[in-house]
Amino acid sequence: MNLLENTLLILLLIATSAFFAISEIALAAARKIKLEQMLDEGEARAARVLALQGQPGHFFTAVQIGLNTVAILAGVLGEGLTLRLFTVLYQVR
């Protein structure tokens, strides 16, 4: 892969990691009272969030697996990039 493809892939991995992190923070920070009020007003999505807050284990497990997968992929990609860079920089002439 060339530099542009690697850069785009790294940016995609960063965006994916941000999505997982924001999802986790949003669920943890959502106020139960406000969600119950929204549910009373007919907001169906509030019921899903309340259900997730009631049993968050599967959600947080999926988020952590996603974050770890992104980190591993970024490490693999970064290793390939830095190996080529250091090979060129430290070549014995």
Image: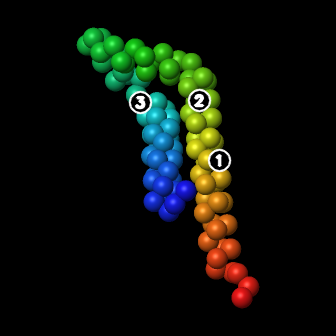
Helix, strand or loop status at disc 3: loop
Taking 53 as reference, is 57 left or right?
right
Q: Position of residue 7 (x, y in %)?
A: 48, 58
Q: Position of residue 47 (x, y in %)?
A: 40, 14
Count of all numbered marks drawn on residues in the image: 3
Quarter of the image for residue 49 reads top left
Q: Position of residue 15 (x, y in %)?
A: 45, 46
Residue type marked 1 = Ile
> Residue 25, can we see it?
no
Residue ID for mark 2: 62
The numbered mark, 3 or 2, whose residue comes first in the sequence reads: 3
Residue type marked 2 = Ala
Quarter of the image for residue 38 reads top left
Q: Which mark is residue 72?
A: 1
Residue furthest left in the image: 41
Look at discs 2 and 1 and give the one toward the viewer: 1
**Residue at the image point whose x is 56% and y is 18% from the top:** 55
Residue ID for mark 3: 30
Q: Which mark is residue 87?
A: none
Q: Residues within 10 Å of mark 2 (few under 14, many from 20)?
A: few
